Amino acid sequence: MCPYALRAWVHHLAQVSSLRTRQSVLKRVVGREIGNTLTGGYWAYFNPVTRSVQPPKALLTIFASHGMIDVVEPSDQIGAGPALLEGAHEGHRHVVRDILHTFDLSSDVLINTLSAARASGNETLLIEIVDHILARYPTDCGSLWPADVMRRASWLGLDRFLDKMFTLGCPVETEAQVMTEPRPISLLYQAVWNSQKKAARVLLQHGANINYKTIQDNTAMHLAARNGDADMIKMLIETAKPNLEGTSNEGSTPLYQACTWGHHKVAELLLHAGADPNMGHQKGEWPPLTSATYEGHQRCVELLLQHGADPNSSSPEGSALFCAAAWSHTNHCQILLEAGAKPNNPDDETPIIINIVCSFTNETTLLNTMRLLVGKGANADSQISSLGMTALMCAAYNTSGPQAEIVDTLLSRNANVQHVDKNGDPALYHFVTAKGSNPRALELLLQHGANTNYLDLDQKNRILHNAVQNQPREFVRILLENGADPNLRAKAPFTPLMLACG
């Protein structure tokens, strides 16, 4: 109970409504050793981050922090100073006003009071303290205004206070240190960071640099775009003349940031203001369109195309259509195709159909995307150039996907079942080799003319041999029913029957 009593006795005293009762209680402790014990104990159990460096020497200081200035009268300026700081820190205007009007305090004490009041975020209190300082020292404090107060005001959006201080001559380009940034940032950047639109407007009206860059070369526009703060972007564009194409140290523009994070309202404002729809992440060569399609932000894709973005723009991952198809964003593919995207874009290192065939996304969206693309002319016989493997061959290894439906779709677009890879093997060989292949896919290949008795580059046939070794009996039955010769020998001197019996 002792720790609780030391922490909470002032709070409980404040609940007593009668001033006479409170003063009667305090007569028992003021000026006595118990008063010093209570004062020190209260300080010791207070928050070590926010408490004063030194313990208070008078009970008045503690009471002032709770807004109780009437229970103990300050006897002199020495006792009034700490009480004034505590009252300002907690935002108690009446405490600050009473002490300021009672004592003639030095400019240093008043400036420290202003600095202490920043913690409360009480804008009216801050303005009142400034007015008192100006009335008491009209010419001596111009260079003493604490920068920490300006930083706090920009973060909290105290626009009236900021306007007053800038009018008094405080520098607009004061920088603030924050934990997440390796070096200080401008007041404008800090206001934008915390979505303080009124404060940001005041800063701009007093000459803040809209194109100020952090150590990462981010501007306020980059920050607001990444945060999706459309109201802030609108205000920044209307109030100042920001560089819409400014790039960060990683090469990204504000439009790229907005499209990557899917902030379509911000993207629309930037495009209407004249942002280049094709200028995005310069160092990585990612246009906004490919980023938006890759991340699945359909509204951003639509806006970019409406404002002239190149539908065939490419990134290190491939074209915009390739990125949309890779994640089975069927709607995005439809939009891009209608805008003129090429389904057989030479900039795509891997053909778009093969990329879809090898993907493991939702079966329905995979098939819908694939059918859309082959219907719009995507090459069903596209190949991986280094291996000579076609989409049909690649489908053999997507055993966890809708393999039979993929094969059916490709064959419906006249995919060539006789085509061989660089090892001389056709699609049929890959299907009997890959464990877990779908028997229905095998039947489709045979129905479209796949040769069960083909000879490879070594003039050997391995279809039935591999089926015996890798597949269930059903595969062997299907092959035999479709003309596979059980007497053909592969490289080893064994027939399929020997392998089955061995």
Image (cartoon, rainbow, N blue to C red):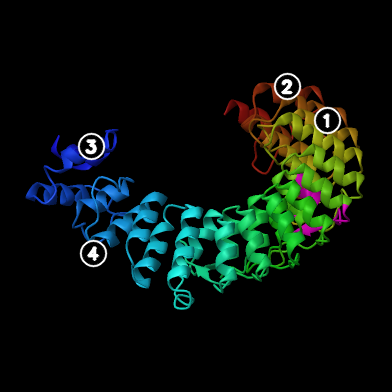
Q: Residue at coordinates 88% horizontally, 39% vertically from top-left?
A: 374
76 left or right, relative to 120: left
Q: Residues within 10 Å of mark 3 (few under 14, many from 20)?
A: few
Residue under pointer 2: 477
* In-front residue for pair 55/33: 33
Q: Is residue 72 magenta?
A: no
200 up-or-down from 367: above or below: below
In-front residue for pair 427/83: 83
| Three-letter residue code for mark 3 | Arg
Q: Disc 1 designates what residue? A: 408
Instruction: Say if residue 465 shows up in the picture.
Output: no
Going by the numbered disc 1, the residue's amino acid type is Asp
Q: Are marks 3 and 4 in contact (CB under 8 Å)?
A: no
Point out the frontmost of discs 1 and 2: 1
Q: Quadrant of residue 357?
A: top right
Q: Nearer the viewer, residue 15 or 200?
A: 15
Residue situated furthest left in the rendering: 33
The segment highlighted magenta reads 307-325
Which badge, 3 or 4, comes first in the chain's sequence? 3
Which structural element holds mark 2? helix
Kindly identify the residue that appears in the image at 74 percent across and 68 percent down: 243
Q: Quadrant of residue 364?
A: top right
The circle drawn on residue 78 is 4
**Figure quadrant of residue 282:** bottom right
Q: Which mark is residue 20?
A: 3
Q: Using the numbered discs, state the Cα–Cα distance from disc 4 to disc 2 in whole angstroms.
A: 103 Å
